[in-house]
């Protein structure tokens, strides 16, 4: 089978790799679509120089084989079903996993291809193999929607740890792909209002078209949106935490979803946090219960219009280099590979 490998900055090659053998508890999936995320962009541009590496962790496809120990079990995907795939290698035994925080599994993530190439998902390929418990059925949803299972699971994780409830007033800092998914999920969960904050007029206009109740630049957010119950920071930048805290009403929560540059520090007044009972929550990745929720939402079709609007372009696997180039050098929401 073919698998894409990033070998150097702005260099992506297709290599031949044996089709994975299916173990008793595995499923083999023919990849239908794989999304290009920030990690792949960094690998491609050389800001995260890990070479050679086989990336791709936002994967969906059709089950073509099921292991003998799990075939026919309730909840296990059958041959022919469409699934979205969790490619984290959760160990299940470290302190984080034992506490139910497997997003923070302490075992090093990833694996290797047959020739020793580092695998960080290896989803830009014709087939992937995972444990059956890591394949989540998405019903009759389009394959492009199923490929958004991983980022939607991350957003479900964000909403869960942030304590989002129906009736909450919500602001999202950053109107990119993950900001838009936060908008969609918050509306789905019954938020009273959802506003998006960004520096791009174009992205703010697109957010309004997608159902945002209000939009604003960072400078005008307090006057435009007023006080909020939950503020999601999906674009980590200097000043974002301070801005988010200033938007919170008493008892509000700031959820730090997007990664920040390592050298960014924040000036936070502990007494202000104390007296107003504010919470600052860091969220990272996703966990199995978030996958269950994300897959069910995708299968329901209730976010179909939102997900459709976030597909910028689709390329076949044979043109994966062009897909990487577009995703890395142009403003996009999601570029998908496969088909």
Image (tube, grey):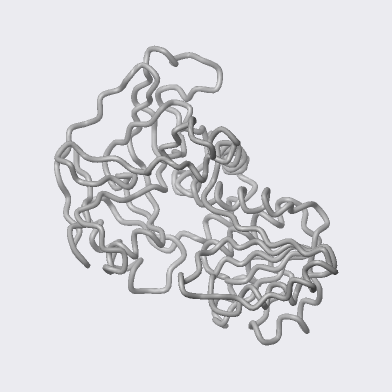
| Figure quadrant of residue 7 | bottom left
On the picture, is 321 further left or further right than 82?
left
In percent of the image, x 59 and y 53: which residue is there? 155
* Whole-percent x, y for residue 80 in the image: 41, 26
Q: Nearer the viewer, residue 224 or 208?
A: 224
| Figure quadrant of residue 193 | bottom right
* Whole-percent x, y for residue 337 in the image: 33, 52
Q: Nearer the viewer, residue 146 or 280?
A: 280
Residue found at the far front of this picture: 271
Q: Nearer the viewer, residue 204 or 254?
A: 254
In percent of the image, x 52 and y 56: which residue is there? 308
In percent of the image, x 59 and y 42: which residue is there? 290
| Figure quadrant of residue 174 | bottom right
On the picture, is 293 further left or further right than 335?
right
On the picture, is 164 further left or further right than 234?
right
* Whole-percent x, y for residue 124 in the image: 29, 48
In percent of the image, x 34 and y 44: which residue is there? 121
Position of 292 relative to 104 (above/below): above
- The total number of labels drawn is 0
Locate the N terminus and report the quarter of the image it occupies: top left
* Whole-percent x, y for residue 123 in the image: 32, 45
Position of 90 relative to 182 (above/below): above
On the picture, is 26 further left or further right than 117?
right
Q: Nearer the viewer, residue 57 or 310?
A: 57
């Amino acid at each position: 089978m073919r698998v894409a490998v990033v070998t150097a900055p702005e260099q992506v090659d297709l290599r031949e790799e044996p089709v994975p053998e299916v173990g008793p508890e595995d499923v083999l999936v023919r990849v239908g679509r794989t999304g290009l995320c920030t990690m792949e962009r960094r690998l491609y541009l050389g800001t995260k120089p890990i070479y050679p590496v086989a990336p791709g962790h936002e994967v969906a496809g059709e089950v073509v084989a099921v292991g003998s120990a799990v075939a026919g079990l309730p909840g296990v995907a059958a041959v022919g079903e469409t699934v979205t795939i969790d490619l984290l290698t959760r160990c299940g035994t470290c302190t984080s996993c034992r506490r139910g925080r497997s997003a923070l599994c302490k075992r090093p993530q990833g694996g290797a291809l047959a020739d020793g190439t580092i695998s960080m998902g290896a989803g830009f390929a014709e087939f992937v193999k995972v444990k059956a418990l890591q394949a989540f059925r998405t019903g009759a949803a389009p394959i492009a929607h199923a490929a958004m299972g991983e980022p939607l699971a991350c957003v479900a994780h964000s909403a869960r740890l942030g304590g989002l409830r129906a009736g909450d007033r919500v602001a999202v800092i950053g109107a990119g792909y993950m900001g838009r998914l936060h908008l969609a999920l918050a509306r789905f969960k019954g938020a009273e209002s959802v506003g998006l904050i960004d520096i791009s007029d174009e992205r703010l206009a697109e957010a309004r078209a997608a159902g945002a109740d209000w939009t604003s630049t960072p400078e005008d957010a307090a006057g435009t949106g007023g006080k909020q119950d939950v503020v999601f920071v999906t674009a980590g930048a200097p000043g974002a935490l301070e801005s988010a805290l200033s938007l919170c009403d008493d008892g509000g929560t700031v959820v730090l979803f997007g990664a920040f540059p390592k050298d960014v520090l924040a000036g936070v007044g502990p007494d202000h946090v104390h007296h107003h009972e504010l919470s600052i929550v860091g969220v990272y990745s996703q966990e199995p219960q978030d996958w269950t929720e994300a897959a069910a939402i995708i299968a329901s079709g209730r976010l179909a219009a939102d997900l459709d609007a976030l597909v910028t372009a689709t390329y076949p696997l044979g043109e994966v280099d062009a897909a990487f180039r577009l995703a890395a050098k142009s403003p996009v929401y999601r570029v998908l590979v496969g088909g």
